[in-house]
Each structure stands twice: as structure tokens, then as C-alpha cells.
């Protein structure tokens, strides 16, 4: 028997309620915008939970902090509306600062218990050359929250914990990953994806968008080489049980 037969890779196409947890307001749009639009069209309820306010990432100067936060939220909602995102939550930690992974993990558990997604999507914290600590800490916090959310002695918000009944999260998926095991044909949604990314005007110049588009086309065309389509976005999809003491997780 093979590992994949013992614990099958979850099928994200079948998810009914997807919670996307990202370090910054544009990460899901860039890394999995096509998949999000694809799932939304299939009827999946998409929710965004964003860890930081992304107020440090502006390419223009002399904008007050509160205004930067509001701009990023407005841009995110505009982009998400294009992709089909239904609901947004923000934790508003300052990006590129020393926010607590432990505190964020517990906040994520709180939102998992509130929303009760059957699938969670986040950024891959094990990407080999990822230098942005917001990404690493976000991915680790989400991964730990997914495996601990059903434990009743981990407390979050009293009202939410009181009304929570433990349930099974069917899968966790990682974008910005070097080890995808799921590739979805998203060519139909590529134009919509980049229309959404273009809404993040405070973060990207026209040249940035053009470079990102070229990279996206090369990268995602290569991902599709072994499939019967010519462009697709990739995810590393795991059963949550593989996130603890599971030696083969990287190989699945």
C-alpha cells in the first residue's frame, strides 16, 4: 500500500467553504487568484482572513498610517469582488514587524471555529528561499491552528468557544509552494486574476504588473506540462493529519 492510498490527498475542487489566510492583502490574489475564481464559480464560499495591514509595503511616501491601512482594505475588497470573495476579516498586525506567531495562531483558531471551513488555504512556510518573515510566520501559524483547532482546552473568544463543536477540516492547501501536488486548469480565469491584482495600485507599478504577468505565464505553463491543459495554478494539498510527525509530507 502507498502513502496516498492510506491517507488520500484531499480534493480541493469539492470544498464548500474555503478560508484563505494570508499575510498581506494581495497574497492570495497573486498566488492563487485563478483557483479562487474557479472555486467561486463552482459555488464555493470564499472568505479572506488577512494577518497584517500591509502599511509598510507602499511605493509612495508621506501617507499617514491609518490612511494606508484603509487604502489596502479598499483595494483588497475591490480585487476580491472580481474573484468572487464573499467575506473579509482583518487582524491588522503591522507588517514586517515582530508580531507574535503564538497570538496569531490563537486568533486564527478563533476564526476557524467561527467560520467552520472544510478547507483552508495559506502560503507555504517551507518555501526554501522565502525571506519574508510575515509569510513564514503566517504559514506556520495557520498550519498549527488547523491541527489544534478542535482541542477544547485551547481557548479563544468565550462566546465562540461556547458555541463550537469540534469538526474535521478536510484539507489544507499551500500556495507559493515549490512542491505542488495539485494543479488546476485556471487559464479561463487568468484575465480575471490580473484584473484583480491590478486593483492593488498602492503596491504595484505598471512595470511590476507586466513583470508579474510574464513570470506567472512562464511558471504556470511549466506546471501544466504533464497535464492536458497548457496553463494551471499549483497548490500543495495535504490532509491535516500530515502536518505533525509525518515524514513523507514533503513527498506526497
Image (cartoon, rainbow, N blue to C red):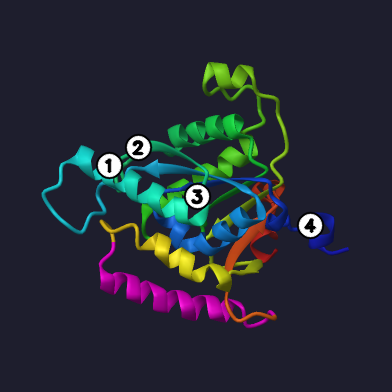
Lower position in the chain sequence, tag 3 or tag 4 = 4
**Residue positioned 59% across, 34% down in the render:** 115
Q: Which residues are magenta?
A: 204-227
Of helix, strand and loop, which one carries label 3? helix
**Is mark 1 in CB contact (under 8 Å) with mark 2?**
yes
State how far apart marks 1 and 2 are (Cα): 8 Å
Is the residue 207 above or below the residue 116 in the image? below
Residue hosting label 4? 8
Q: Which secondary structure dominates the residues rendered in magenta?
A: helix
Residue hosting label 1? 69
Image quarter for residue 198? bottom left
State how far apart marks 1 and 4 are (Cα): 41 Å
State how far apart marks 3 and 4 are (Cα): 22 Å
Does residue 25 appear in the picture of this structure? no
Q: Closer to us: mark 4 or mark 2?
A: 2
Q: Nearer the viewer, residue 74 or 19?
A: 74
Lower position in the chain sequence, tag 2 or tag 3 = 2
State how far apart marks 4 and 2 are (Cα): 36 Å
**Is mark 3 in CB contact (under 8 Å) with mark 1?**
no
Amino acid at each position: 500500500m502507498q502513502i496516498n492510498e492510506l491517507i488520500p490527498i484531499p480534493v480541493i475542487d469539492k470544498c464548500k467553504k474555503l478560508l484563505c489566510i494570508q499575510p498581506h492583502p494581495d497574497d492570495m490574489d497573486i498566488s492563487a487568484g485563478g483557483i479562487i475564481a474557479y472555486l467561486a464559480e463552482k459555488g464555493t464560499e470564499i472568505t479572506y482572513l488577512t494577518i497584517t495591514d500591509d502599511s509598510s509595503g507602499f511605493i509612495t511616501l508621506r501617507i499617514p498610517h491609518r490612511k494606508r491601512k484603509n487604502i489596502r482594505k479598499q483595494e483588497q475588497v475591490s480585487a476580491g469582488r472580481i474573484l468572487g470573495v464573499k467575506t473579509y476579516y482583518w487582524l491588522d498586525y503591522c507588517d514586517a514587524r515582530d508580531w507574535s506567531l503564538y497570538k496569531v495562531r490563537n486568533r486564527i483558531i478563533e476564526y476557524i471555529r467561527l467560520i467552520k471551513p472544510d478547507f483552508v488555504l495559506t502560503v507555504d512556510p517551507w518555501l526554501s528561499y522565502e525571506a519574508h518573515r510575515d509569510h513564514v510566520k503566517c504559514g506556520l501559524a495557520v498550519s498549527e491552528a488547523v491541527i489544534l483547532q478542535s482541542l477544547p482546552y485551547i481557548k479563544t473568544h468565550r462566546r465562540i468557544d461556547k458555541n463550537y463543536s469540534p469538526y474535521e477540516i478536510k484539507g489544507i492547501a499551500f500556495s507559493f509552494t515549490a512542491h505542488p501536488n495539485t494543479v488546476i486548469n485556471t487559464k479561463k480565469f487568468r484575465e480575471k486574476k490580473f484584473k484583480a491584482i491590478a486593483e492593488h495600485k498602492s503596491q504595484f507599478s505598471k512595470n511590476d504588473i507586466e513583470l508579474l504577468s510574464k513570470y506567472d505565464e512562464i511558471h504556470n505553463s511549466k506546471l501544466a506540462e504533464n497535464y492536458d491543459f497548457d496553463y494551471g495554478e499549483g497548490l500543495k494539498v495535504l490532509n491535516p493529519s500530515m502536518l505533525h510527525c509525518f515524514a513523507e509530507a514533503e513527498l506526497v
